Amino acid sequence: MKPGFLVLLMVFFPIQMFPLEASPKLNTNHIRLASGEKLSHLHQPMEGNSNVGGTYEADMKLTPLQQKEIIDGIHTLDSTGRSKRKVVKNRSFLWPKGIIVYKFNDAVNGLPNHIRNTVESAMDNWEKTTCLRFQKSSEDVKWEVGHSNYVLISKGSGCSSYVGMVNDGPQEITISESCNNVVSIAHEIGHSFGFYHEQSRPDRDYFVNIRHENIKPGFQGDFKKYDRQIIDTSEMYDIGSVMHYGPTWFSKDNNSQTIEPIDKGLLGIMGQRDELSFIDIKTANALYTCNAVCTTNMDCKNEGYIGPNCTCVCPPALSGRKCEHIKRGTQGCGYILNETSGTFTSPNFPGNYAENTDCYWLIQSQQKSAIITVTFDTYEMEDDALGCGYDWLEIRKYGIGLAGPRFCANGPSSKIVYNGPALMLHFHSDDRHSFKGFRAAYTIASK
C-alpha cells in the first residue's frame, strides 16, 4: 500500500455505519422455520469443501518457484528483472495470445458430462467479459499458439488448479461433485490464467481481520499474507471478488469465522460465488492487455474503462456508450439523482415494497469534488443479523464498481456522509416477507 493510502481511505469513507437494534416485527426467522423455508447463511465457497492433497490455500497447486516465493518467503525475480505481482506478471506464466488451451480427461472414470457442461459455462463467463479464449487442444491449436501446454480438466476429490501457465505439457485442474458450480469453477479457471486469492494481498489487514484462534489446527499457513514483492495491484481490495475466501474457510468447527471484514456490512458478500465481480473482470482484462489494440480516446464515466471490444465496460447497474445511464429496476424504480437536494424511496412507499425487486440510484454531482449526504427518516426491512441475506440496501461507499455494505432491519444509525462525486445505492428484496422500506433525503454540496 502506498504511503498515505489509509489516510485517503479515512478521508473518502469517514463515517462508520452501524445498524440499529431491529424491531421484533422485522424478524421473520420463526415464520421461515415454521414453513420450512431456508434461512440465510454465510457464503461457504464450494471449492473449499474438500482439501485436495498437495495444494496450498485449499485449491492452489504451486510450482517449486511459486512455493519458494509464497511459502518460504524467498523473493525472486522474473526474466526481465521484475518482481511477481498481484496476478502473474512474468510473461512466461501468461497464456500466449490469451488462449487457454484445454482438454477433458477421458480416462476411465473421467469427468462426467454434467460437470463438463458446468466447466464450459464457467469458461463462457470469462469469454463473454474478457479477451480470453478457451480452445480444445489440437495440432492446429498448438501451431496457432506456438506451444504444447494445455490444461487437463479431470475428476478429482475437490477443486484445484495451478496458478498461470506453468508446465511444458499438461497441467491439471481437478473438479468434483462437491464444487460443481459455475462460479466456483470460474474461480479455478481464474487461478489457471494467473489469479491468486484476494485475501492474500499485502494490504488485506486494512480490510479484513484474520481470526487465528478459529482456524483449524494445521491450517494457519493457508492464511499467509504475501509479500509486496510477490503480489500487488492497482485496484482497490475487492471483498466481493470470486477469488476471496468465505468467512468460515478452514474453521475449527465449520461455524466460527476465520476471516471477518472490518466493515461488518460486507459480511454478506464475502465469499460469494454468484457472479464474477466487476473488478475480477477488469483485472483479467488488464492482465492480458485486452484493449491494447484500441485507438479510441473515449472518456468512460463513473469508473467505466475501455474493454476488449474498444468500448466502455460499465460497473454493475450502469450502461450507455460512456456509462452515463442507470439501469431501471424491476418495478420501474431507480434514477440518477443530480439535483442539489431531493428525496427517494423504496418502491410503493409507504406501502410495502414488492417481492423480487431490484432498484438502483446514482446520486451524482456535476462537480468532480463533492460531499454527498444521505439521511433516512424511515427504514423498515426484514431483519437478518447474518449478513442481510433477505432484503437489503447496499451503499457502495468504496466505489461504484465495488461491493458496499448492506443494511436491513432498521438500517443505518446515522446519516451517511460520502466524499466523492457519485454514490450508488442498490435496493434488493427476495421472494417473500416484504415491509415498508425506506424514505431518504440527500444533498450534494461542493467541497
Image (cartoon, rainbow, N blue to C red):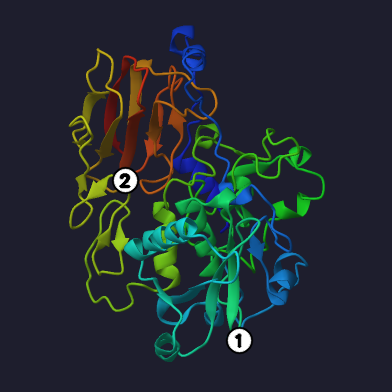
Q: Which numbered dot is residue 210?
A: none
The x, y position of residue 140, in whole percent, is 40, 89
Residue displayed at 22% across by 28% down: 341
Residue type at numbered disc 1: Ser
Nearest the eye: 371 or 267: 267
Q: Earlier in the sequence, mark 2 or mark 1?
A: 1
Who is closer to the viewer here, 138 or 337? 138
Residue 162 in view of the camera: no
| Cα distance between the residues tagged 2 and 1 | 43 Å
* Residue 40 in the figure: left or right of residue 324: right
Q: Which residue in the structure is indicated by mark 2? A: 369
Residue at far right of view: 217
User: Residue 20 or 213: which is nearer the viewer?
Assistant: 213
Task: Determine which quarter of the picture holds residue 69.
Answer: bottom right
Q: Position of residue 319 (x, y in %)?
A: 22, 50
Name the amino acid type tagged 2.
Answer: Ser
Location of residue 325 with respect to 167 vertically, above or below: above
